[in-house]
Image (spheres, rainbow, N blue to C red):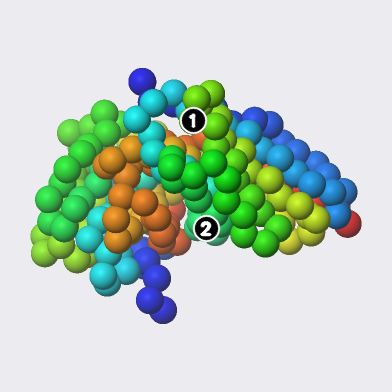
Amino acid sequence: DTGVSQDPRHKITKRGQNVTFRCDPISEHNRLYWYRQTLGQGPEFLTYFQNEAQLEKSRLLSDRFSAERPKGSFSTLEIQRTEQGDSAMYLCASSPSSYEQYFGPGTRLTVT
Amino acid sequence: GENVEQHPSTLSVQEGDSAVIKCTYSDSASNYFPWYKQELGKRPQLIIDIRSNVGEKKDQRIAVTLNKTAKHFSLHITETQPEDSAVYFCAASSQTGKLIFGQGTTLQVKP
């Protein structure tokens, strides 16, 4: 499968724990985006990378959230001290330019 | 701030009829307008897109129109089929590629 992949697909964690998600983009795509989607809503932008540089972060991304793309390939999104309000689907998308974005299957996070 | 409004929130049509979903954006710097289809529990799938230098684009049964002056763009699906049933999202982006999504339209096509 040459599409965007994400791991894990599901994560259940207790409030206060740290979690980390991984995204593997389509190999030739230099742009990588993270979004969060809650039930019944459209995806909300969190952050994006061009190669290894993180170029924009949403105000939604509190200090508890951090993202990296160390070698310009895969990316990780970490949430520290999770809260119940962090429960959502975390989507990753990759793009060869500032246009078409292709989404991964998402990581569904449940914070109990 | 950046905002995309999408209407209607739900749409029910008979198989074979047409469906139209409309979006309005606020950021005049927006230059790219994709449409995504999302089935329950699945990833958003890019179905068609349009760039700001084009007024209309068609791909088989789906078409998108853009009115930059009015900051409106629309998705048109003709000869709807039950497998078109899904949630459809419009989005707008500018140079960074950051997508601002509408609230979504749940389309139901009745056989």
Specify whether disc 2 shares its chain with disc 1.
Answer: yes
A58 or B31, nearer to the observer: B31
B14 or A57, nearer to the observer: B14
Mark linked to residue B45: 2
Asked if one can make out residue A37 in the rendered structure from this viewpoint, the answer is: no
Mark linked to residue B22: none
Instruction: Give the distance between the C-alpha atoms of the residues marked 2 and 1, in whole angstroms.
Output: 24 Å
* Chain of the residue on which disc 2 is drawn: B
Residue at horizontal 33 percent and vertical 41 percent from the top? B98
A34 or A90, nearer to the observer: A34
Residue farthest along the top direction in this orientation: B1
Residue at horizontal 11 percent and vertical 60 percent from the top? A70
- N-term-proximal mark, 2 vs 1: 2
B19 or A88, nearer to the observer: B19
Residue at horizontal 40 percent and vertical 71 percent from the top? A3
Residue to which mark 1 is pinned = B68
- B108 sits left or right of B53 in the view: right
Asked if one can make out residue A5 in the rendered structure from this viewpoint, the answer is: yes
- A30 sits left or right of B77 in the view: left
Q: Amino acid at mark 1?
A: Lys
Q: Is residue A95 above or below residue B24?
A: below
How busy is the neighbourhood of tag 2: few (under 14 within 10 Å), some, or many (20 plus)? some
Q: Quadrant of residue B13?
A: top right
Q: Amino acid at mark 2?
A: Gln
Q: In front: mark 2 or mark 1? A: 1
* Chain of the residue on which disc 1 is drawn: B
